[in-house]
Amino acid sequence: MKKKRRQKKPIKRGLRRPFEWLGILLGMLVFSNVTHRMMLALCDFASAVMYRFDRAGRDVSLFNLRVVTGVYPPERDMKTPHDSPPTRRETLILRRSYRNMARTVGHLFWTSRRSGERARSAAALTEQCRELLAKYRPVVTVSGHIGCWEVLSQLVHLEGHKMMSVAKDIGTPAMTRLLMRSRKAIGQEIVHADGAFRALMKGIKDGYDIGLLVDQVVRPKEGGVWVRFFGRPMPVSAAPAFFAAKAKTPVLVAWSRPLKDGTYRCELLDAIDADAARDVWACTQRCLSALERVIRRHPSCWVLNYHYFRKTPKAASLAQLEKREGRIA
């Protein structure tokens, strides 16, 4: 008779929950009531503390960084111990990645008050982005966990577009509701990831733009498709291509570049027209390839402590991926 495996995750989540609540409450009560400069300083302090104590996260971050920089080849498994401790340069990048993540969350809380005014003061779209947003309504906007991803949908909404984005659970249901309320402060619609398909389909028919983050694992049975990301197979959402094809509108791939003064400039990475979006796999691969190019140039702006490469395709799925790659080679 097989012994039951110990359930460690629920215990860890239970221990972590009070700290998550404390962080969110402090964010809503403190970050929303300070100046932009003070908010950045608080975020930088919080990120230094997170980096110091998040040993598991640092390990994942180092693995992902070495995948990005080509130190680890595609066949290297994350379970294999690191060959060496992080170099001085790698440590600097990892710390900056934690700082970028903290500043993104800080921006979310900071813009929960006087949302439009604060979002405009903290970020701006390039003229190219403005022109495309003025030309197409609705549009599917795509980004990743790089730069300040929260500000992209805010700026699209401020350009006069009705905006709908997707949010996943973070901590307890009550914490998720609090964070969703902060995201809705500027006027955009936020739908829960579970059952989001119907809401997004209705939204795009009603003229809403859709904002999606694609650099996260989505299993094929949940609407994902296998693509290549930094040379590694990864299942990601095919939703951008699907909705763009349905609405006959382009997919705009963008990111928010952090500037030295703590503000952001939102730049276009690729524009995929509606006809090209009809090839769901090719469109999805193109979105990930655009993000990959900017991440290689700015790895410290990417959230490195996420298990991007935890899924391995079965033989049939890998063969299908290789066949598709051969088709567009």
Image (cartoon, grey):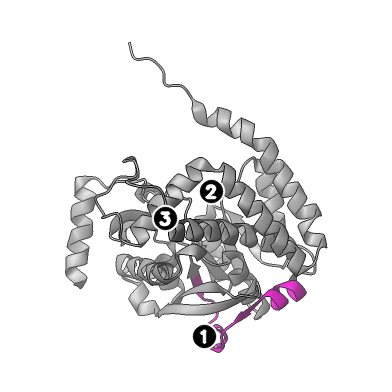
- Which residue is painted at 52% across and 87% down in the image? 128
Is residue 30 at all visible to an observer of this figure?
Answer: yes
- Which residue is painted at 21% across and 65% down in the image? 325
The amino acid on which the numbered mark 3 sits, given as a three-letter code, is: Thr
Task: Name the residue nearer the viewer: 53 or 126.
Answer: 53
Q: Assess whether residue 124 is covered by the magenta stretch.
A: yes
* Disc 3 residue crowd, few under 14, some 14–19, many 20+, Cα 10 Å: few
Q: Earlier in the sequence, mark 3 or mark 2?
A: 3
- Mark 2 or 1, which is nearer the eye? 1
Q: Assess whether residue 63 is covered by the magenta stretch.
A: no
The amino acid on which the numbered mark 2 sits, given as a three-letter code, is: Asp
Q: Which residue is mark 3?
A: 87
Q: Quadrant of residue 165?
A: bottom right
- Mark 3 or 2, which is nearer the eye? 3
- Which residue is painted at 32% across and 46% down in the image? 83
The amino acid on which the numbered mark 1 sits, given as a three-letter code, is: Leu
Whole-percent x, y for residue 324 in the image: 21, 64
Q: Secondary structure at mark 2?
A: loop
Q: Is residue 69 left or right of residue 206?
A: left
Whole-percent x, y for residue 179 in the image: 68, 53
Q: Earlier in the sequence, mark 2 or mark 1?
A: 1
Q: Which residue is mark 2?
A: 194
Task: Name the residue nearer the viewer: 312 or 47.
Answer: 47
Label 3 close to label 1 by CB (< 8 Å):
no
* Residue stretch in magenta: 116-141
* Disc 1 residue crowd, few under 14, some 14–19, many 20+, Cα 10 Å: some
Q: Which mark is residue 132?
A: 1
